[in-house]
Image: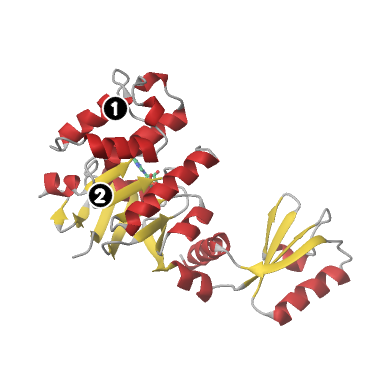
Amino acid sequence: MPAISFQKVSKTYRGGQVRALDGVSFDIAQGEFFGLLGPNGAGKTSLISILAGLAQASGGSVKVMGHDVVTDYAAARQALGIVPQELVFDPFFSVREALKIQSGYFGVRNNEAWIDELLENLGLADKAHANMRQLSGGMKRRVLVAQALVHRPPVIVLDEPTAGVDVELRQTLWQFIARLNREGHTVLLTTHYLEEAEALCGRLAMLKLGRIVALDRTSDLLKGRASTMLRFKTDAALPASLQEQARTTGRIVQIKAHDAAEVETVLATLRAAQCPIEDLEIGRADLEDVFLEIMQQEGSAA
Ligand SMILES: Nc1ncnc2c1ncn2[C@@H]1O[C@H](COP(=O)(O)OP(=O)(O)OP(=O)(O)O)[C@@H](O)[C@H]1O
């Protein structure tokens, strides 16, 4: 039985005018660390909302540990721990109280030992008695993670958990989530940080305009695409023939090359145009390169 199963899920808004999801089908196996990627508006939040039972699909079905999220909502919800994108919290309780209340909501009693472990592992131990409204944004986010995990759900869903989060919390969070994953919990992560996805996720799905445009093991996605990237800095304008294929961020230019001959061609073109370059590096394509390539291809195919 898969941990999560999406079957032909579709979602439209405004009476069918906006098609946010268009027949999305895939399974996530138990124990996977799975990443869901896509540009703004691809449909990630819609898919997670349907999974969480916060929105209804216009068609298709979703199961969590075999439980349909609509017809068997309570069991599906019990199997899920969802860390939401937005900071929603009750300002009247202390951190420990909030976690106890959440435990009660899931029918878990005598949960003190696990609550202590959550507080410890998320760097919240000294904030246990602080009132929620006194906490900084980063601390509130840690509490949201703890709340999502309070009933030890087999399936953990993290919806952009590191947006606007400092380096220390990211490391604390990923260490803890990676440990839970090693212990058998399934993790579904949506993120715009492709470095995190590359480092953490064993398998990835890429969504674009409500459709899955890539679904593979992370290592195979990286292997199967443009293998080499040329990176350098320049203050000059690039020759026209290179402009099309280059990705430019300020002075930094990245150009894809499939093999050594292509690397030579790019360098010869730069030399012929007398375009001065600095800090030349030749490296492997990373997930960001692969992501952009897939999104561009799918754009031109549509
Ligand atoms: N309540 C709504 N009413 C109308 N259109 C909506 C609504 N919610 C989402 N949409 C549209 O559905 C599409 C998918 O949106 P969704 O929020 O699921 O994408 P996303 O991948 O989560 O984007 P982001 O990365 O920006 O969070 C978009 O075109 C969006 O404008």
Q: In terms of sequence position, does the residue under pointer 1 or pointer 2 come before the other?
A: 2
Q: Amino acid at mark 2?
A: Leu
- Amino acid type assigned to the residue bearing label 1 in the image: Arg
Mark 1 crowdedness (10 Å alpha carbons): few <14, some 14-19, many ≥20: many
Query: How far across and how far down the image is residue 291, in percent?
Result: 52, 61
Disc 1 vs disc 2: which is toward the camera?
A: 1
Q: Position of residue 22 (x, y in %)?
A: 31, 58
Q: Quadrant of the C terminus?
A: bottom left
Please give the label number shown on residue 226: none
Respond yes or no on whether mark 2 lies under 8 Å from ligand 1: no
Q: Work out which residue is located at the far front of the displayed protein and give it.
A: 113
Query: Residue 293 occupies which quadrant of the picture?
Result: bottom right
Mark 1 touching mark 2, by CB under 8 A? no
Residue at the disc numbered 2: 51
Left or right: residue 85 versus residue 235 is: left
- Residue furthest to the right in view is 274
Q: Percent position (x, y) of residue 69? A: 17, 50
Query: Residue 258: where, in percent of width, then height?
Result: 64, 77
Q: Residue at x 43, y 30 (%)?
A: 139
Give the quadrant of the N terminus.
Answer: bottom left
Q: Which residue is mark 1?
A: 96
Left or right side of 300 for 34 = left
In this view, the residue farthest toward the bottom is 261
Picture layout, residue 130 above or below residue 236: above
Residue 120 or residue 30, whichever sits in front: 120
